[in-house]
Image (spheres, coloured by chain):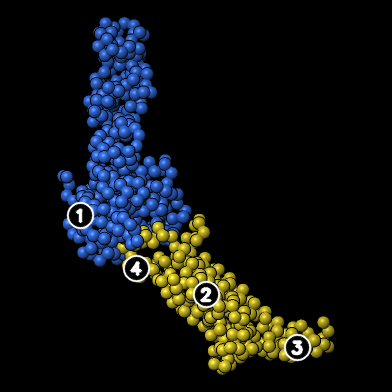
Amino acid sequence: MSIFATRHDRLLSWEWIGDHTDEIWERTLQHLQLTGYAVGIGLVIAMAMSMVALRWRRAYAPLAALSGALYSIPSLALFAILVPYTGLGFRPVLIALVTYTLLILLRNIVAGIDGVPRSVLEAADGMGYEPWRRFLAVDLRLATPAIIGGIRVATVTVIGLVTVGALVGSGGYGVFINDGLSRNFTTPIIVGGGLSIAMAIAFDLLFVAVQRLTTPWSRAGMAP
Amino acid sequence: MSQPVAIRLEQVCKRYPGAAGLAVDHLDLEIPTGEIVALVGPSGCGKTTTLKMINRLIEPTSGTIEIHGRPADELPVHELRRGIGYVIQQTGLFPHKTVAGNIATVPRLLGWDKARTRERVEELVDLVGLERQMLDRYPSALSGGQQQRVGVARALAADPPILLMDEPYSAVDPIVRARLQDELLDLQRRVHKTIVLVTHDVDEALKLGDRVVILNVGGVLEQAAPPAEILADPASPFVADFLGEELGLKRLALLRVRDITPDTGPVAEVGDDADSVRALMQEHRVTWFGIREHGRLLGWQWGSTLDGEVRADGAEPFRTVVSPDTTLRSALDGIVNSLTNVAVVIDDDGEYRGMVRIEEISEGVR
């Protein structure tokens, strides 16, 4: 590459990156914040839905169908639907992202808790666990690998979708990509895209580690 | 019944929602303190339902259940259960807890302090015959037999007076099962719990139970009695049929050599002359004789090989030697395998106690 080339001709301009470190940091925080809120709120709602589904088994199919329907709406379309009600910015994207996490989380929580062996639950009851205590110490504890697995997939999915959210003004790495696309300037596209991929991989690995740490028994022999 | 009653069921019925008939039908049962009571019957006989009504995993439809004289529904259900040990078929061990954590379950629920819990856990591991190094392992790293032992240790952790066991050995192979059964009997000699055990295996019930309760489909009581009594006198054709083949051999498995009177046998002292030995053999109608010296039985010798007086170096060792604790079944097995057709009884001090022949055994069963 020639040093006489204009910065727009180069694939990656280190100069641009150097000028924008503050903004890169700010967008990183926005991206993390939006992901964190979406998965956090999604987890609370999905947990509540799971409780309902576990308590009344007939509720599971409609709840799964509802969250499945929400999941199938293309993200950009969903943002567009929400904007008239919420205005541009953080809120429509957050709402949309939360709805995407529901199906994944609901399925994993219910499957995880359903997967706890009956004999283990019977033994727990027989030994005198109170129902709430059993739920926390046995059901939920043994469902942890499946639940963390769900959080992992939801998080990685959301990190990707936050990028799209920049189109309706949510901030995050998508801002760089939009900026680069509008100016036909590759550096911010690579920075925004690369960082969101890196973030997704980092969280994926993080949750694999968390899953291992929280399930030491699964390394002792049988798979969880 | 000599022992005070630990668990009493009175007119207990269970009807499952939507079921046509009763699962348990007006059952009256008294379970004496410190005994092993085996509930046995075909599937659908309500044996597991009966067991689970004791710790209220299943609530009876009608009737009363008393535990140590108090109605089972007097206490909050979790408190009742913490006072009753519970062992189940697939062990139900918590996969996410170590062996130590599993055993400590009920002490933790009861709020014991760490030191006391730890001490108790170690005591139990020794009691059920596990290695202390296993304490930090997860159940998945243990064999089926080891898991079952952990299950028993867990059930005994808070030293409950009552232990309920729901088909505890049906998931392990026959060799391990036999060993675990022996261990349970051995354990019971030390802990003296009231044990209610459910099994579909009548031989297991006869082996383990001080009393055996035979139930028929629909939760109908057929017979409740000590094993020897059931084998000697089945209360109904159903019971006789359920006991299966080889009733005589099953009874022999319950009786021990000490329960019968052995014969002194054709035994000569070292130094006896040939004439007295011949008279001895004639009297016992055998062609061999035993050789004794100073109260110890050295062995035996064919009469035809006797030359002069009885000498110690002529003695051939007996092939079948039993102790007073040996079951008549294995004594019989030894007898049919021996050349002399006797089992020699030697007690723990090495003293000669006599000989058992098929005649004595069939006398004992009669």
Q: CA distance from mark 3 to mark 2?
A: 42 Å
Say if residue B108 shows up in the picture: no
Chain letter of disc 4 in the image: A
Which residue lies at the image location 29% right of the left edge and 40% below the top edge?
B239
Quadrant of residue B283 within the rendered picture: top left
Secondary element type, mark 3: loop
Q: Position of residue B58 (x, y in %)?
A: 30, 60
Q: Name the residue beneath numbered marker 1.
A: B10
Q: Name the residue beneath numbered marker 4.
A: A131
The residue type indicated by label 1 comes to Glu
The residue type indicated by label 3 comes to Asn
Q: CA distance from mark 2 to mark 4?
A: 29 Å
Q: CA distance from mark 1 to mark 2?
A: 50 Å
Q: Could you tell me if the residues under marks 3 and 1 are in contact, i.e. CB atoms within 8 Å?
A: no
Chain letter of disc 2 in the image: A
Chain letter of disc 3 in the image: A
Camera-near label (2 vs 4) is 2
Q: Is residue B279 above or below residue B156?
A: above
Q: Name the residue beneath numbered marker 2.
A: A65
Secondary element type, mark 1: strand
